Amino acid sequence: MSNSSSMPAQAKSLKHAGEDIWKNRTEKVNAELFTLTYGAIVSQLCTDYERNFQKVNEQLYSMGYNIGVRLIEDFLARTALPRCENMVSTSEVVSKCAFKIFLNITPQITNWSHEKDAFSLILVENPLSDFVELPMDAMKQLWYSNILCGVLRGALEMVQLDCDVWFISDVLRGDPQTELRIKLNKVLKDEIPIGED
Amino acid sequence: MPQYFAIIGKRDNPVYEAEFTAQQGQQGQVQQGFPQNLKELNPFILHASLDIIEDLQWKTNPNTQSGSNSGGGGGFLRSRNVANVDNCYLCKVDHFYGLAVTAYLTYGGMKFVMIHGNMNNGDVQIDDNSVRAFYQEVHELYIKTLMNPFYKINDPITSPAFDSRVRALARKYLNK
Amino acid sequence: MTSKMAGDTRSHTNPEQDGMTEQQKLQHQLQVFQNSLPKVNQIAFQMLLNEMVPLAVSVENKLINSEIKGTPKRNSSELEEMITNVHITAPLDKPSHKLCQQLYEANDGTREKILERLRSMGNQIGNKLTELLVFSNNPNLVFKDMDLLSVMKFICRDVWKQFYGKQIDNLKTNHRGTFYLLDYEYRPIQTFALDDQSTEEELAMIKPFFEIPVGLIKGVLSSLGYKEEEVVCMASYIDRPTDRPKSTFNKGVSFHVQVNMQ
């Protein structure tokens, strides 16, 4: 990144803020419980949709969206961060604050598009998918952690960022890394209330 | 000496089984397995010992006074003969023509059972410490398998990763 | 007969416990161990749990839809292509509260299918959960006296604490297989602020949120040897005792468990 020299400093302070909130102001539960619960959801969906994994992906995505549009409230209240001025600072907030505070992981930001409107998050750890082994028939079709895409899409939309979010690869499928892509479509106008009814 | 190890489910159904043979015997003997005739008998021997394990499992502990801290005082007292959590290991529970059978129970009611073969018709020596350690680590692997949402309790464990890890544990603890 | 859950070590009348300190030591060790395990944010977990209710409704909607339309099954290579090439945002559901509203208005048959889906997920969690908590050397559950009452206490203390951040407030039993687990501040519904004017409709809309723990309880029991067909579990509202501090939700929940043993 050959950005302005203020970036590293900002990133550093975001990292600090995320860690501080996680450490001192967050009630925690055992990750095993979280993993087990999410696993029960995915497995139930696979049964309900008779292993039509495309439908499972969609359902997880839309479940995530409905969580994201509400989770952002908690996030903004907790962090009291100012609005991000560009996608670069958005990416820092997502990785160092949002992922840190909710899942205690800090995905790596990489693969910026030339226009700086799209980036990837590399998830080295993923509490959703600990211990998971995909069955053969799901290997090429199921995006096991697709709920994350929905959460991000929903949350970003609530701060006026209309984004596409999708998985490019997943270690569960035998890929070398788990990569999640976020691409900005457009910045929404303030006066349009989304998800309001 | 060879071993035949199995995980038996709640309906006495086999969930996983494996035979371990010494890769490298002490005196350079290689691939010391069960003789063919015994190999075929193993599942039967193991099944016969399930009854004994069940007995041990449901046995009322004479030290537990009925009524103390227990629901119906006798009626559905489900005590077991092992004293604490570390002690899922039941030691040697049965023997059959010089073969010894050991067992281990999980809280969820899965039975880990193993037939220990002998090498030169001598009595089988069981090193409880290493056998217990083996069972405990397999238990841990089993729990990790359970955490996989696509694995249903009581189904056969087919994961090659599980199999190779169990075999690695056998080499570490049983056939040193 | 009532046995208070809070400070339960005292009501333990085990004759062998000459050292209460030993028990406390084990409890402490368990606490230290559990603190050392990986963690996630409680709010993230809570939202995931609560979102299961609208999720179950949405699934039912889609199943009914595809039944009506009779969508032909695509072959798998076609599917694969769709999934790899298309990342356009999936069609979104209605907002969660609309789905919950829909559940309230659903006919009995549909509602029962949705509730059954919730219980099934709870059951799956409970079934596997026992091995995990127990595995971490839990002194609250020992083979030696694993009768039904101590299993219920395990649910009240350990399972509830892990899931809902608090223990069950009160456990009642007739010592013949009937138990009432009373939670006066059932965590998942505390965010739905309801005052004394709460209507029947509002209460009925929130009730589906009891079904996951219903499945959970049955799952834990079945993993410990109490077969599913031997256990009946139901949840209902109860009034909170007047001496408890006011909470945001003015009703408690009673989980009624009936274990029929031969």
Image (cartoon, coloured by chain):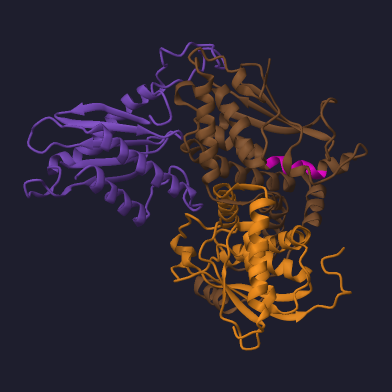
Chain colours: A orange, B purple, C brown
The magenta region covers C205-211
B21 shown above or below C170: below
Instruction: Please say whether residue B167 is one of the residues in the magenta stretch.
Output: no
C63 shown above or below B132: below
Q: Quadrant of the C terminus of chain B?
A: top left
The spot of residue A46 in percent (x, y) is 56, 57
Q: At 49% across and 35% down in the image, what residue appears?
A: C134
The spot of residue C187 in percent (x, y) is 73, 41
Q: Which residue is most to the right?
A: C197
Q: Nearer the viewer, residue B108 or C23?
A: C23
Q: Nearer the viewer, residue B100 or A45?
A: B100
A135 shown above or below C229: below
In screen coordinates, is B176 left or right of A185? left
Is residue A183 at least partly visible in the picture? no
In screen coordinates, is C225 left or right of C169? left
In screen coordinates, is A71 left or right of C146? right
Q: At 79% across and 74% down in the image, what residue appears?
A: A160
Q: Nearer the viewer, residue A104 or A58?
A: A104
Classified by dominant secondary structure, the portion drawn in magenta counts as helix
The spot of residue A33 in percent (x, y) is 57, 47
Is residue C195 at least partly visible in the picture? yes
The spot of residue C223 in percent (x, y) is 51, 35
